Amino acid sequence: MNAKAGQLVLTVLVGLLTLPAKASVSPAAAELLDKFRKALDATQSLIESYEEVLDYSYRMPGMSDPMLDGKRFARGQHRVDGRRTYIQNYYWGDLSGRDRDRPESSPGYYLRIETDKRLYYHSTAVNDPRVKGSAYSDPGTREKAVISIGTYSGIFGFLGADERLDAVLRGANRISVRPTTETVNGSACQVIDADTKYGQYTVWLDPAHGYHAAKATRSAVGGQKENQWTMADGDRSTACLDNVHFKQVDGVWVPMEAEQDTAYTSGESFRKNHSHYKRTRVALNPDHERLGSFDDPLLKNPTNDPELKNGTRVTIRAPISIKGSWKDGKVVDGSGKVIEYAK
């Protein structure tokens, strides 16, 4: 081999050695991840009614409520299909430092609908004449579904990441399967450990319940990701999904109830949440198009927003921003004239 050829070989070898490392997924891990993916795929399109009890505490120096803890209750409906979300939430209890013990008869309310190109949002308070609700529609917004940052996100397959947990594990830097099973809620579970860009995960997959996660933990530090954001140096984030209960719906195992703990610390600030989430009704794989599950209430289907009442302030962002109020199924201006925003 001449000197020129030898230098070329050396250059290629050095290049190979400096390529970024890619996780080696063992056959055992790959098989479990396939089963986990199928379990989540089977339950990603649904309509559900739910209840949640949330215990929270936080410390945020500089805010009007710098330190607060309390208990918040919620009920509502979710519609999801893997890329679109409908999140309806009625909430009461301790809402802020000045709004404590709000009764269920006069709850806060929000509705958020996100599709590929459209965002709809409505926030108000029910049976409270002091609050005039505001509804907003943006036909040109491309939003990412926010189910991944809910205090209950683990039951949907998201934990500290804007990617579904099976995808997070599949993209791990290092992943391994523990040699023996571990019992969670009476089930012998296969345990996966993974080092990912979102932090360290341990997931207990339950073969007796369709290979859903019976438990999952996450721990992340500065430089790693929290959902779609990179955590600052010195920050720390933890999460745990536990006490998951399952039920068969149309022959498919569905997580029906779970507890989730999340905590985030940044300097002198912190927030902690403990969520007890329960699905009270589930319909799998509904015909979302026929039902109009994700239709914009202002532009197409007002029944999608049960609190869209006369007097609600309205903003529609079209080529220009249109402002008015809702009256008898129409958007009107200050004089009561119908605004022909479709034109």
Image: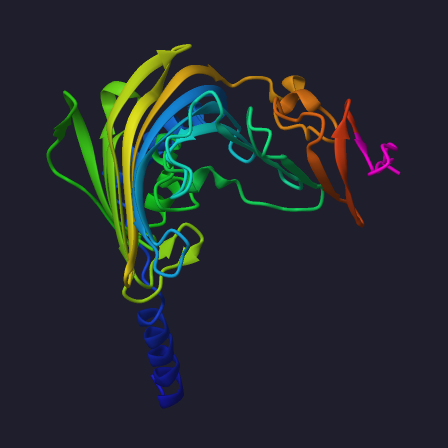
Secondary structure predominantly adopted by residues drawn in magenta: loop
Towards the viewer: 126 or 177: 126
Is residue 211 at all visible to an observer of this figure? no
Residue 337: in magenta span = yes
Q: Which residue is drawn at 31% across and 71% down?
A: 17
Residue 327: in magenta span = no
- Region rendered in magenta: 331-343
| Relative to 235, 137 lies left or right | right
Q: Which residue is drawn at 43% across and 40% down?
A: 148
| Relative to 292, 213 lies left or right | left
State the image coordinates of residue 305 (x, y, percent, origin top left): 63, 25
Q: Residue at x 41, y 50 (%)?
A: 227
Towards the viewer: 137 or 160: 137
Is residue 55 at all visible to an observer of this figure? yes
Q: Looking at the picture, does residue 72 appear above or below residue 22? A: above
| Relative to 109, 205 lies left or right | left
**Quadrant housing residue 16:** bottom left
- Image quarter where the N terminus lies is bottom left
**Quadrant housing residue 159:** top left
State the image coordinates of residue 205 (x, y, percent, origin top left): 24, 30
